[in-house]
Image: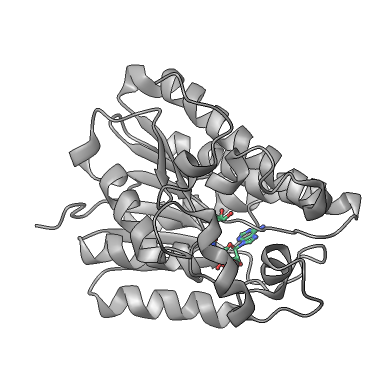
């Protein structure tokens, strides 16, 4: 028996990065997956997003583990598209037990006001829409996990004016995700449905490994490379690492989806190599 044996989990942003890592880790432990991804770029976001081939590869890897995956192209900004995707997935896989709402963009470094709106639309509205689409199918005792960001929670992180309006939108959206999860947990507790957030530090995915991100970490250089950024990444964390792996986030997600965490709700779970305790603006009261 796996730790999430025969559960069906809906994952947004499943084509690559953390979303793929979650799909594979959950499948290893016995879950079937409904996974959506935009598989297209967003103009204000200055690095490429996933492709249809990436999504097909996640499906292939899940199936290689002996589990089923319904992989569909859908935009988390579109509530109707998510509703249809979840309905199709549930029709094929028979049920829905958990949601991992984690599709995201990080449009740093542009002064285009549209970047603010796009970050909010994907990084907050996308989480809301995923929950909205899933809720009618979720049984009592289900689990909802949303991905925030420790950088988004630290004042002066991505909302630093040097990060541009996209960074401000990213921070706004991630704070809103944290707040939403808090009150969602309260709202759904009578049904035993849990809602938790995970907040990663720098994570080794395409979002971090992008020229956009290199420029934010090395503003002293005109054209920083990954090697230049690698020297700066560790400043984010208390532990002596520049980033964590998507599998480190997947371990937390697996726990939160599984019944091992059946009484864990409203948690803001940082997987951040000590980033928050290093950079927090003041002593926490707890
Ligand atoms: N990588 C990091 O350093 C880091 C740090 C903290 C938080 N996060 C958060 O982790 C989550 C996952 O990001 P990642 O690191 O795997 O990056 P990633 O860019 O590899 O993956 C994000 C995925 O979301 C998809 N996506 C983007 N917009 C979408 C939309 N409108 N509809 C559907 N899918 C869409 C992309 O195509 C991509 O597959 C995001 O919410 C991100 O903000 C990442």
Residue ranking furthest to the right: 112
Q: Residue 129: where, in percent of width, then height?
A: 60, 42
- Residue in view at x 90 percent, y 49 percent: 113
- Whether residue 283 is visible here, answered yes or no, is yes
Q: Quadrant of ligand 1?
A: bottom right
- Residue in view at x 76 percent, y 66 percent: 219
Residue placed most toward the observer, 48 or 281: 281
Q: Is residue 211 left or right of residue 276?
A: right
Q: How many marks?
A: 0
Give the quadrant of the C terminus: top left
As drawn, 167 above or below 137: below
Q: Residue 100: where, in percent of width, then height?
A: 44, 49
Q: How is the image coloured?
A: one colour
Q: Name the image quarter holding residue 189.
A: top left
Q: Residue 276: where, in percent of width, then height?
A: 49, 42
Give the quadrant of the N terminus: bottom left
- Residue in view at x 24 percent, y 75 percent: 65
Q: Is residue 262 left or right of residue 33?
A: left
As drawn, 37 above or below 129: below
- Whether residue 206 is visible here, answered yes or no, is no
Residue ranking furthest to the left: 1
Q: Name the image quarter holding residue 282.
A: top right
Residue placed most toward the observer, 272 or 53: 272
Residue placed most toward the observer, 21 or 284: 284
Q: Residue 122: where, in percent of width, then height?
A: 67, 50
Residue placed most toward the observer, 159 or 16: 159
Q: Name the image quarter holding residue 180.
A: top right
């Amino acid at each position: 028996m796996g730790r999430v044996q025969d559960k069906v989990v809906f994952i947004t942003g499943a084509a690559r990065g953390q979303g793929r890592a979650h799909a594979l880790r959950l499948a290893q432990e016995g879950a079937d997956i409904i996974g959506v991804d935009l598989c297209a770029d967003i103009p204000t976001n200055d690095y490429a997003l996933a492709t249809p081939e990436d999504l097909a590869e996640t499906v292939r890897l899940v199936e290689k583990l002996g589990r089923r995956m319904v992989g569909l192209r859908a935009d988390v900004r579109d509530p109707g598209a998510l509703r249809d995707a979840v309905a199709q997935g549930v029709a094929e896989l028979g049920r829905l037990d958990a949601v991992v709402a984690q599709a995201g963009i990080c449009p740093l470094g542009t002064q285009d006001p549209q970047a603010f709106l796009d970050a909010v639309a994907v990084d907050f509205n996308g989480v809301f829409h995923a929950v909205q689409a899933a809720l009618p199918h979720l049984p009592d005792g289900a689990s909802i996990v949303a991905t925030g960001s420790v950088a988004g929670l630290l004042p002066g992180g991505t909302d630093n004016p040097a990060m541009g309006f996209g960074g401000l939108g990213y921070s706004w959206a991630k704070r809103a995700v944290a707040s939403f999860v808090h009150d969602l947990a309260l709202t759904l507790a009578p049904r035993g449905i849990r809602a938790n957030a995970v907040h990663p530090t720098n994570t080794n995915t395409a979002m971090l490994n992008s020229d956009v991100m290199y420029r934010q970490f090395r503003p002293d250089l005109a054209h920083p490379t990954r090697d230049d950024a690698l020297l700066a990444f560790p400043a984010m964390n208390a532990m002596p690492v520049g980033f964590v792996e998507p599998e480190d986030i997947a371990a937390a997600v697996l726990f939160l989806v599984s019944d091992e965490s059946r009484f864990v709700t409203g948690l803001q779970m940082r997987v951040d190599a000590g980033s928050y305790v290093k950079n927090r603006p003041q002593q926490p009261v707890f």
